[in-house]
Image (tube, rainbow, N blue to C red):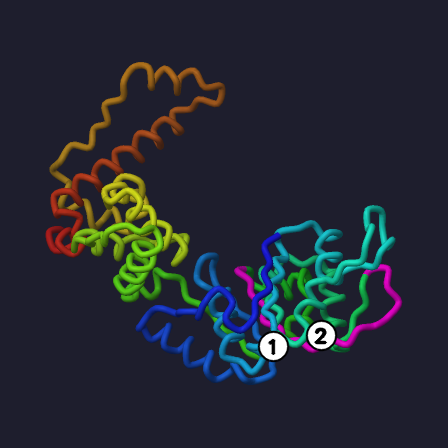
Amino acid sequence: MKHGKEGKHGPGLPVLIGQTPEMIDIREKIRTVADKEINLLITGETGTGKELIARSIHFYSRRNEGPLVKINCGALPEQLLESEVLGFQKGAFTGAHKSKPGRLELAHGGTLFIDEIGALSISLQAKFLQVLEDREFSRLGGTREKVLDIRVVAATNADLRKMVREATFRKDLYYRLNNVHMKVPPLREKKDDIPMLTHYFLNKYCLELKKKVLEVPEHVIDFLHSYQWPGNVRELENVVRRAIVLGDWNFIFDEMILDVPASKEELEASTLADSAFVDWPDDRVRTYLGEPNFSLKKISKACVSEAERKLILKALRETEWNRKRLLNNSV
């Protein structure tokens, strides 16, 4: 289970990089709500930076001298999660050889960050709701109620409103958490931030890994801008870190090519006259023929996929990986 307890300075000042309208709006919202004693709900795809926003809210709040404690609801089964959150008294269950404070208790006087709140079971949702309403709780096996002073920031990549409609998430808990809602856009919706993010991660990891500064050619930036980034900012960070370690960007063209969002129509004009014939060796054909679930549809799909990949790769190489030129050539 990933969780953390940190004071004012924690792992460092949270930095939200970006100058797109979406990022400017998020920073303004953080400044507006940081000092308000209200609960917040942060939603967005995995890797968009929800935890960074939660840390920023804590850092700029009046609670920043207190702890920031994280609970990852998707990392443990229900029974273990309950004891991790509430804590337990000695002898509360088999193996409880000594008392242990829970995440709620550790967050007293600070901020509780509940990550993946959508993964909570209905029974634990009820307990969280009671804690938020009463501001009191007791450890498992305990008899004494403890007063709780926390500010709650919850995050999820799930559609909680849909879960409420399907009765898999409590409506009352949803409204209790959703005093203010911050939706983090995916990286593909704020691509103008990619160059700034790329250079930020370059500076960060060149210093951290003690590597010389790695240049970013224009065709690399064009490629990064064209990619859809299903893993969002976290994926971009990992790509930059790997490029620094390898000292080269070439791996992105081979490993990320299938996710370049150039449509078939965009590529057809520049590649229509070219042959997309895929010459498979005999042993590969025999592999497909020998499969128990072999079908012509399956082998045809595999062949078409490989042909499409070759066409995309060829078109990008002809334009030196510059998607703008590729589009202009196809008009």
Q: Which residue lies under the disc numbered 2? A: 132
C-alpha distance separating marks 1 and 2: 10 Å
The local secondary structure at tag 2 comes to helix
| Depicted 313 relative to depicted 20: above or below | above
**Image point (40%, 17%), residue name:** 289
Q: Which residue lies under the disc numbered 1? A: 39
**Image point (15%, 40%), residue name:** 272
What residue range appears in magenta?
140-157
Q: Quadrant of residue 237?
A: bottom left
The residue positioned farthest toward the front in the image shown: 210
Count the marks: how many? 2
Q: Say if the magenta span includes residue 144.
A: yes
Q: Quadrant of residue 204?
A: bottom left
Q: How far across and how far down the image is residue 325, in percent?
A: 12, 54
Front position in the image: 261 or 317: 317
Can you tell which mark lies on residue 52? none
**Image point (25%, 43%), residue name:** 253
* Dot 1 alpha-carbon crowd within 10 angstroms: few under 14, some 14 to 19, many 20 or more: many
Mark 1 and 2 residues: CB-CB less than 8 Å, in contact?
yes
